[in-house]
Image: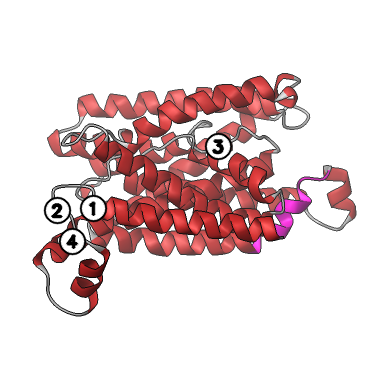
Amino acid sequence: MSRRWLSFIVVSVLLAGLFFWAVNTGGIKISVLALYKGLFIEYNRDVEIIFDLRFPRIFIALMAGGALAVSGVLLQAVMKNPLADPGIIGISAGAGFFSAAAVMLFPALFFFIPMFAFAGGMVACLLVYTLSWKSGLSPLRIILVGIAINAVFTGLLSALQYIGGSSSRNMINSIVNAGMTMKTWADVRMLTGYVLFGVTASLFAAGKCNLLALEDKTVRNLGVNVNAVRIIISAIAVLLASIATAVVGTISFVGLIVPHIARLLIGRDHKVLLPFSCLLGSFTVLFADTVGRTIAYPFEIPAAIVMAVVGGVFFIFLLRRSERIYGG
């Protein structure tokens, strides 16, 4: 218990420090005291610029990271697969493709993009389940099918870049490259409602996630409808991943790396694992975005590229260590 509390405290402190670092990444620097005064006491032009340009980007990175991490935890619980991640098994790619297609075909429905993204994520998830099912779900088969689904939707998304106009191409580029530049408070408000709903729903489903770690026969003997539970939890996971993709683009490996680190720190109880993963996921994506803004300043490296470099190495490491995956 003390280790869990210590983990929460340490990550919270690190997140607070990272937040201030992100605020000061760029041409304008400001102290904590000046930031506080500018926000709550007296007008400060530098604080106004930071508030309008950097704060939305920071809050979006925090919420998107938390959403992707929670989505990864839920998918791993449902699929009983430690390598399940919305960016690897095609859910994010499906959400991105449907979002881009909606922008091209129905520009007037721009504000309904989250719904199109959710539909695309559900289609990808259903395809993974359907094509992976063969007298049960095999962890190896899920990953292989998921990678294939991811490749198909990524290819379709890339094809849209060549047939769309300049405005559509910019939107598609932001989805592919996980661009967080030029985000506004309108984007923050849109993301906030969906993420709060999805994370809250996941906390209510934490007990069911613990049950799914047992054999299906055992869970059925406890009076639980396993298939219904899987569908509900999968829908929550897809919602979180799809909404994050619709706003910030496709960021892979967050839902893979964060849950594994979280389990090492606080254990496997989903009632604690889910909120801690949300916190750690927020830290991870904000860190990736801030590093991308800093490492080649004044140029920016998208957070998706930073996560791909780190996550690819981590994915190989997990593959080499996981005997269960190799065993099918």
Percent x, y for residue 210?
Answer: 75, 52
Question: Of residues 216 and 282, which is closer to you in this image?
Answer: 282
Give the residue pinned by disc 4: 52
Give the residue pinned by disc 3: 256
Q: Amino acid at mark 2?
A: Ile
Question: Badge 4: how crowded within 10 Å, few (<14), some, or many (20+)?
Answer: some
At 55% across and 28% down in the image, what residue appears? Answer: 146
Give the residue pinned by disc 2: 28
Tell me the distance, in whole angstroms, between the alpha carbons under discs 1 and 3. Answer: 29 Å
Tell me the distance, in whole angstroms, between the alpha carbons under discs 2 and 3. Answer: 34 Å
Position of 209 relative to 158 (above/below) = below
Tell me the distance, in whole angstroms, between the alpha carbons under discs 2 and 4. Answer: 13 Å
Q: Amino acid at mark 1?
A: Asn
The kind of secondary structure element at disc 3 is helix
Tell me the distance, in whole angstroms, between the alpha carbons under discs 1 and 2. Answer: 7 Å
Q: Are marks 4 and 1 in contact (CB under 8 Å)?
A: no
Tell me which segment is drawn in magenta.
Answer: 204-214
